[in-house]
């Protein structure tokens, strides 16, 4: 059976988990320790052994250990091709991969500047002011990406046509993080907002969203304070 090492608040781990559940692939989960104060320290020995980047997710299949959510998703789709999580043609698959890249590196870049909201206010007023200023700039960048993604849906139920793909999974997870970090609302972007609600209605997505909310209640009390 496949074994997934993941963090309770790891966006990239949860991408893999959604794919496993959407495909109905039996798997075992192994959560690694995490706190806001120490992060993933001390690192889990299985993660250290498998991933030179020292990060989750790590997927173990027999004597094969994989890391990086994109590599893992491609492996799962080749190993379990039904239902597919990539479109049929090379051109469509390329667009799909670019949208996943958008989620992981373009949209997520400003989201990093919102992560300070998971922590209690920094005791240094200057540091706190710098964090708040960076957060305001990040919100503007996220809102601009939301507008572009809203236009990109162009009346479709999913970003790459009529079926769910890794692009939807990646974008959902990054957008979920914008919402948990009190980022810009989705309501001004009707197509994107409706897409997000449709995915939240799917059991795999709903379970991940609920587990992250539960983990935040335990691990991120600063978010409850707004």
Image (tube, helix red, strand yellow):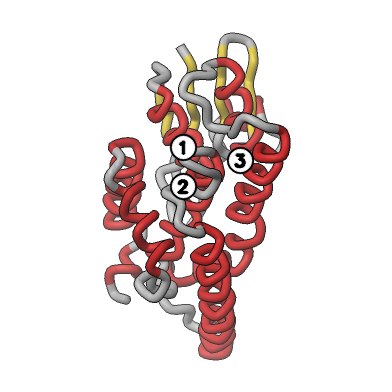
Q: Is residue 12 positioned above or below 27 on the image?
A: below
The Cα–Cα distance between marks 1 and 3, rounded to whole angstroms, is 30 Å
Q: Residue at x 51, y 77 (%)?
A: 139
Horizontal and vertical percent position of residue 148 = 57, 68
Q: Residue at x 59, y 62 (%)?
A: 107
Horizontal and vertical percent position of residue 32 = 46, 36
Residue 168 falls left or right of residue 69: left
**Which of disc 3 and disc 1 is earlier in sequence?**
3
Task: Judge whether residue 130 can be spotted in this image.
Answer: yes
Q: Which residue is mark 1?
A: 163
Where the N terminus falls, by quadrant? top left
Q: Residue at x 58, y 82 (%)?
A: 137
Residue 187 falls left or right of residue 73: left
Task: Judge whether residue 120 can be spotted in this image.
Answer: no
Q: Which residue is mark 2?
A: 158
Q: Are marks 1 and 2 in contact (CB under 8 Å)?
A: yes
Q: Which residue is mark 3?
A: 55
Foreground pick, 36 / 139: 139
């Amino acid at each position: 059976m496949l074994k997934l090492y993941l963090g309770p608040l790891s966006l990239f781990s949860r991408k893999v988990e959604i794919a496993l559940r959407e495909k109905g692939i039996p798997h075992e989960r192994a959560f690694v320790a995490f706190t806001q104060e120490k992060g993933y320290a001390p690192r889990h020995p299985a993660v250290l052994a498998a991933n030179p980047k020292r990060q989750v997710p790590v997927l173990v299949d027999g004597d094969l250990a994989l890391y990086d959510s994109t590599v893992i998703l491609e492996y799962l789709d080749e190993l379990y091709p039904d239902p597919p999580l990539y479109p049929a043609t090379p051109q469509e698959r390329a667009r799909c991969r670019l949208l996943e890249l958008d989620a992981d590196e373009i949209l997520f870049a400003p989201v990093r500047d919102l992560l300070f909201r998971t922590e209690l206010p920094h005791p240094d007023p200057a540091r706190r002011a710098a964090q708040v200023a960076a957060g305001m700039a990040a919100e503007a960048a996220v809102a601009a990406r939301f507008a572009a993604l809203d236009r990109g849906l162009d009346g479709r139920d999913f970003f790459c046509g009529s079926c769910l793909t890794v692009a939807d999974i990646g974008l959902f997870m990054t957008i979920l993080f914008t919402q948990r970090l009190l980022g810009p609302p989705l309501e001004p972007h009707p197509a994107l907002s409706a897409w997000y609600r449709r995915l939240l209605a799917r059991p795999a997505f709903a379970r991940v969203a609920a587990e992250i909310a539960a983990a935040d209640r335990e691990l991120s009390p600063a978010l409850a304070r707004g």
